[in-house]
């Protein structure tokens, strides 16, 4: 007997956009084999879908696999049943973040949230983002030091100017922020983010 | 005027019986039949109104017969399913009770009420019942004005036309011819044989395709009742059951009957062109035969390539021909063929994933071929002499990947259907290769193996025991390996045990795609010409998916083989024989019942304005002259009583019986009361 | 004003303007100048939301709104947009798609824009820079500007996953006709340069740029696939159309074990080389993986074509 939990979980997944063909999966494995990150997943998209259908929802809930999805949409264009596994992965991620919050994923969600926060903060503040700043702020000073060789490459090729680099280093990356020149337009983006962005705080 | 007086006209039928059908749950679930009966009883002409579980049952019919006698009914209203389904049943029923067949009016409360508004979902039944009452009452209004019509019969032309000369057409033509009727077999190519002639062996017994097909082809050539027209295409199509006219274009062959099939002309011909019979893998000449056992056994010239025909240069074949069989003056000929019945057997074409399913890289490597190409490579009369070459370097591959369900069961190419024959054809070819080269590494990638037929599962088991690997996976990509011309197949095997790596990349030296079946080129256009319905893929629709699988949606046209839906050879032959039996059935009666109703034009009132002549879709109206006065005359054999002429006649004199103006106005008035 | 009078404006995006993709913009500007085409930037453009504001975690509405704000600015400036970065391109198309198909979000965004007296024309055209070169400038005009036909240079096209997908966003996009997995646009472009375009088995696979910060081992494995395929085809260079692909492919070659390092160039940069622009004007001096072998080969071809007696030399001046 399949438990009521499982049916409820299936319905919940299928309530997200583009996931309505979930149960039509024929297990051909096209999605997993075409997935560029399936080597780093413990199950892969096909097995995740299979888990939802057969009722192994505990494993599905705890799995880190949805976070390994890079959203390249390759599975979507190949699936013979139009199941759109990429959207199912997104739905699972959303469910884990908003509802289940399993212990196992705590660290992962925290990391993800940190990055999202850096991003959202930048957009709110300046309307645009800077990749240098994001990288520095996310990795931290120690993390960035590990990427020293890359930094050196960037300096040597002139992609980062020496004086800028000094500035980045001294201000922990704050100086790398790119601002929209027009303050009014910047303010508009801030208002937009305040109104439409609800996550993370 | 007749039109203004309809209100005053008193309807002729005063005693009407109404019989409502519950049709099990089909009608009764959404329509309160008791309420329908109660409501229609209020009309004074309704002498009896009852409902039955199934009015079409023998008990239900008996009740109608009894009621006709008991109440002396003039006309009968059946409120049940579509007249398409049971009109004949009830006509016969009331005829046995002594009424004229035309005194029947059917109100469709199943397809048009319960199914349309209620089928499959829980809904309020009151509005559906209300509509059913209206529809039934309109039927009563029509019944009030019905008049008895005379039964008519027309003769059937006992000559059949079979379109398509593959195994389906051959079988159908032979069956009809052997029961003594004449058949014309029309084939587009230069020889009959179709796809089956290209096959090497046929499953499940792996017997030689040519060995079983060639005798049948020769039988066609020798049968006195069969007229074979090759290089012929259908241009136009007219008429109805029993009397069709098929206009065909017989293309010039440029080789006369004198041809002895000696091959001298082909050896001298300087023009080389790709040979489609061998999937363009080798060449033939501009004058050539299709294959060595072709029927008719005559060479033919490809006019698009022959320099004599194009630029009046060369003519070597004519000079060298020992029997002087070449005739460059031949012309295309048009011919009208009369036929009582037509069998459509246009077959299929193999799908090719060009610009679709690009992850399979078809066309980017010579070593990715279709199943049909592998048949030609394995066949002894193919370009490789029966060796399964790699097309790139003509070596025998050490590893072969067979990929199933390419272009079928795939929503990405909008073809959800199963092509049914590819699983077995793949198993057959894989087994043949494995038997011949036991060391070959063969993998078959499948979603589901469907071995449904007699002896098919046994062939599957045999293939597994031979050592062929069956892998439950649809390859996510088949990549071309540069330099080696090999392919790399990436897949995830569903059945890999937990803890092992399911996603694998494997290199194969040859990939064979089991591509699905699609309707043949031009089939859809032919369907339009013949008036056939097609499904979403372009296959012809049968009249009923379960009970009339060989009838098309047009009376007198029957379907055989893969033009209806993908099939294997046993199913195709069975359907062809079924279609032939239907034709023989029709011919043996000699006559068919014609529509008793036809438009009648009183010639003394006709002004000769010719309006009706222009609107008639069946060309049934022609102008005639009598005593210097023009008037319109209807050919009852062509008239379908559609009523267009009646509606457009400016003087309103044309009468379409069973749909007379009075009845129509009465029905309209009731519907919008 | 009638719609057909809209001008084409360039939406650069953060990566090209200030991030890792500056060389893309330098080469684009100089090549367009050479082709007598002036760039007009979209004034006051803002971030498109990038990869991180996505379908989940509350980012959906915000990212659609950010894109719609850009479209509103384009409406205000009476412009159609062409976009250099594939991610910005997808995000703007995505905003347009949801703005046109999700009535609830549509109403909310319109409500927000009303405060600033802005609105969005739902039929603004969004074009990728590659399509701008191919269609608006025209392949014929490009062909005329080429001075060194790159005969014999083996170029490996790599488009990346963002350019054609998801397919649904492209349905009403008239510039997108080819296949979502094997688009032919880049091949058509490179054919004009007379280069030997190799087959690409990983044409639209992901390069892992979006997960390079969080899960770099995944990115490395994806890059490995691409590089080994390019190496199998003996490619002289990999040609990209996205600043993030380019930076990822270029900068991480030292992190993974490769048989041979392969130069990475944007399509504008290889076009610039074929038009005989100095490498510095194309931002090629900021390439991390050395491009010297490629420049040498082009130099050699150039001398052969001009009929000069020469030997294949290893040393070439940068500008």
Image: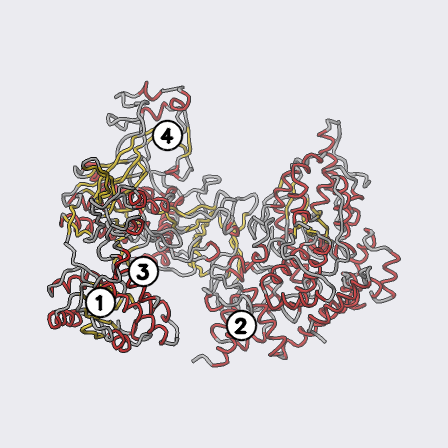
> CB of mark 2 within 8 Å of CB of mark 1?
no
Residue at mark 3 to residue at mark 1: CA–CA distance = 46 Å
**Residue at the spot of label 4:** B302
- Distance Cα–Cα, label 4 vs label 2: 60 Å
Relative placement, left or right, of C234 versus B151 is: right
Q: Tell whether label 1 touches label 3 (CB within 8 Å).
A: no
Q: Secondary structure at mark 4?
A: loop
Please report the residue visible at 22 percent of the width from the left and 55 percent of the height from the top: B657
Which quadrant of the rendered structure holds the C terminus of chain B? Answer: bottom left
Residue at 36% from the left image edge and 60% from the top image edge: B450
Q: How far apart are the two marked residues, 3 and 2, measured between alpha carbons?
A: 37 Å
Query: Can you see residue C67?
Result: no
Name the spot of residue B380 as percent of width and height, x first: 33, 40
Up-down relation of residue B514 to residue B51 (above or below):
above
Q: Which mark is residue B77?
A: 1
Instruction: Using a 10 Å C-alpha cutoff, classify the residue at mark 3 as few (fewer than 14 neighbours), some (14 to 19) or many (20 or more).
Output: few
Q: Are marks 3 and 2 on the same chain?
A: no
Residue behind mark 2:
A15
Q: CA distance from mark 3 to mark 4?
A: 42 Å
Which numbered mark, 1 or 4, is in the foreground of this view? 1
Badge 2 element? loop
Please tell me the numbered disc located at residue B452.
3
Q: Is residue B357 visible?
A: yes
On whether disc 1 and disc 4 are found on a single subunit, the reply is: yes
């Amino acid at each position: 007997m399949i438990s009521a939990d499982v049916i409820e979980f299936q319905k919940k997944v299928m309530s997200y956009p583009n996931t309505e063909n979930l149960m039509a999966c024929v297990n051909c494995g096209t999605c997993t084999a075409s997935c560029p990150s399936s080597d780093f997943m413990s199950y892969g998209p096909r097995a995740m879908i299979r888990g939802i259908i057969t009722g192994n929802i505990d494993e599905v809930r705890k799995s880190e696999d949805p976070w390994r999805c890079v959203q390249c949409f390759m599975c979507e264009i190949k699936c013979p049943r139009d199941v759109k596994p990429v959207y199912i992965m997104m739905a699972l991620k959303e469910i884990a973040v908003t509802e289940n919050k399993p212990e196992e994923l705590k660290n992962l969600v925290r990391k993800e949230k940190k990055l999202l926060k850096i991003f959202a903060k930048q957009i709110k503040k300046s309307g645009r983002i800077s990749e240098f700043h994001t990288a520095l702020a996310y990795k931290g000073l120690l993390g960035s030091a590990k990427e020293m060789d890359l930094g050196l490459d960037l300096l040597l090729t002139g992609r980062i100017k020496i004086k800028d680099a000094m500035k980045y280093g001294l201000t922990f990356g704050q100086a790398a922020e790119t601002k929209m020149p027009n303050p009014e337009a910047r303010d508009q983006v801030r208002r937009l983010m305040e109104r439409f962005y609800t996550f993370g705080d | 005027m007749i039109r203004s007086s309809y209100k005053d006209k008193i309807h002729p039928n005063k005693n009407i019986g109404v019989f409502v059908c519950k049709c099990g749950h089909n009608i009764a679930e959404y329509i309160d039949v008791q309420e329908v009966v109660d409501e229609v009883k209020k009309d004074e002409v309704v002498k009896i109104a009852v409902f039955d579980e199934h009015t079409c049952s023998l008990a239900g019919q008996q009740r109608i017969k009894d009621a006709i006698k008991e109440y002396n009914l003039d006309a009968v209203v059946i409120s049940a399913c579509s007249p398409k389904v049971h009109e004949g049943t009830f006509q016969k029923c009331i005829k046995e009770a002594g009424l004229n067949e035309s005194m029947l009016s059917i109100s469709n409360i199943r397809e048009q009420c319960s199914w349309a508004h209620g089928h499959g979902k829980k809904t309020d039944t009151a509005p559906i019942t209300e509509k059913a009452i209206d529809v039934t009452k309109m039927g009563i209004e029509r019944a009030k004005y019905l008049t008895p019509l005379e039964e008519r019969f027309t003769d059937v032309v006992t000559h059949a036309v079979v379109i398509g000369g593959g195994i389906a057409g051959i079988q159908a033509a032979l069956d009809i011819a052997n029961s003594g009727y004449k058949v014309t077999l029309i084939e587009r190519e230069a020889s009959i044989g179709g796809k089956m002639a290209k096959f090497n062996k046929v499953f499940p017994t792996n017997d030689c395709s040519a060995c079983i097909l060639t005798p049948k082809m020769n039988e066609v050539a020798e049968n006195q009742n069969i007229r074979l027209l090759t290089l012929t295409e259908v241009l136009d199509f007219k008429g109805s059951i029993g009397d069709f006219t098929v206009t065909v274009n017989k293309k010039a062959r440029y080789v006369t009957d004198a041809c002895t099939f000696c091959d001298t002309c082909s050896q001298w011909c300087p023009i080389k062109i790709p040979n489609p019979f061998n999937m363009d893998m080798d060449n033939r000449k501009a004058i050539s035969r299709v294959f060595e056992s072709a029927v008719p056994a005559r060479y033919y010239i490809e006019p698009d390539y022959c320099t004599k025909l194009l630029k009046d240069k060369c003519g070597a074949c004519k000079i060298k021909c020992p029997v002087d069989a070449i005739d460059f003056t031949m012309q295309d000929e048009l011919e009208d063929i009369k036929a009582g019945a037509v069998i459509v057997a246009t077959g299929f074409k193999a799908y090719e994933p060009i610009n679709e399913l690009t992850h399979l890289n078809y066309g980017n490597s010579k070593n990715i071929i279709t199943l049909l190409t592998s048949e030609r490579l394995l066949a002894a009369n193919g370009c490789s002499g029966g060796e399964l070459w790699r097309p790139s370097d003509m070596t025998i591959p050490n590893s072969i990947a067979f990929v199933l369900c390419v272009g079928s069961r795939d929503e990405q190419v909008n073809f959800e259907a199963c092509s049914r024959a590819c699983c077995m054809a793949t198993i057959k070819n894989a087994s043949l290769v494995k038997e011949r080269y036991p060391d070959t590494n063969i993998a078959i990638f499948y979603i589901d193996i469907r071995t449904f037929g007699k002896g098919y599962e046994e062939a599957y088991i045999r293939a597994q025991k031979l050592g062929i690997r069956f892998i439950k996976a649809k390859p996510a990509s088949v990549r071309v390996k540069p330099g080696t011309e090999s392919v790399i197949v990436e897949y995830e095997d569903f059945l890999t045990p937990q803890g092992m790596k399911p996603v694998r990349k494997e290199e194969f030296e040859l990939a064979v795609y089991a591509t699905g079946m699609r309707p043949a080129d031009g089939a859809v256009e032919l369907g339009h010409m013949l008036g056939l319905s097609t499904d979403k893929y372009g296959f012809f629709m049968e009249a009923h998916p379960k009970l009339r699988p060989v009838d098309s949606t047009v009376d007198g046209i029957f379907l055989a083989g893969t033009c209806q839906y993908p099939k294997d050879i046993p199913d195709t032959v069975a359907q062809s024989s079924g279609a032939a039996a239907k034709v023989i059935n029709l011919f043996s009666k000699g006559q068919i019942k014609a529509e008793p109703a036809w438009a009648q034009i009183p010639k003394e009132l006709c002004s000769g304005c010719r309006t009706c002549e222009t609107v008639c879709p069946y060309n049934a109206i022609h102008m005639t002259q009598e005593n210097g006065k023009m008037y319109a005359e209807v050919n009852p054999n062509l008239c379908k009583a559609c009523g267009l002429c009646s509606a457009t006649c400016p003087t309103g004199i044309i009468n379409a019986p069973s749909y007379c103006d009075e009845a129509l106005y009465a029905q309209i008035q009731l519907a919008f009361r | 004003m009638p719609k057909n009078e809209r001008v084409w404006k360039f939406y650069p995006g953060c990566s090209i303007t200030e991030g890792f993709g500056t060389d893309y913009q330098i080469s684009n500007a100089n090549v367009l100048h050479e082709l007598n085409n002036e760039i007009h930037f979209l004034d006051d453009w803002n971030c498109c939301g990038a990869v991180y504001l996505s379908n989940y975690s509350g980012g959906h509405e915000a990212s659609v709104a950010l894109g719609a704000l850009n479209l509103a600015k384009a409406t205000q400036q009476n412009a159609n947009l062409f976009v250099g970065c594939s991610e910005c391109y997808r995000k703007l198309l995505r905003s347009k798609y949801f703005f046109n198909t999700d009535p609830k979000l549509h109403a909310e965004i319109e409500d927000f824009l009303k405060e600033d007296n802005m609105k969005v024309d739902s039929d603004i055209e969004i074009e990728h820079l590659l399509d701008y070169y191919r269609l608006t400038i025209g392949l014929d005009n490009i062909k005329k500007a080429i001075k060194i036909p790159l005969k014999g240079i083996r170029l490996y096209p790599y488009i990346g996953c963002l350019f054609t997908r998801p397919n649904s966003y492209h349905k009403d996009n008239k510039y997108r006709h080819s296949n979502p997995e094997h688009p032919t646009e880049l091949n058509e472009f490179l054919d004009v340069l007379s280069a030997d375009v190799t087959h690409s088995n990983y044409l639209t696979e992901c390069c892992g740029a979006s997960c390079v910060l969080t899960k770099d081992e995944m990115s490395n494995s994806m890059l490995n696939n691409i590089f080994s395929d390019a190496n199998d085809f003996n490619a002289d260079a990999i040609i990209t159309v996205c600043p993030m692909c380019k930076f990822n492919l270029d900068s991480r070659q030292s992190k993974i074990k490769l048989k041979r390092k392969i130069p990475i160039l944007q399509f504008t940069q290889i076009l610039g080389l074929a038009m005989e622009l100095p490498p510095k004007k194309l931002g090629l001096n900021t390439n991390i993986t050395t491009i010297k072998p490629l420049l040498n080969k082009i130099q050699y071809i150039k001398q052969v074509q001009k009929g000069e007696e020469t030997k294949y030399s290893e040393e070439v001046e940068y500008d």
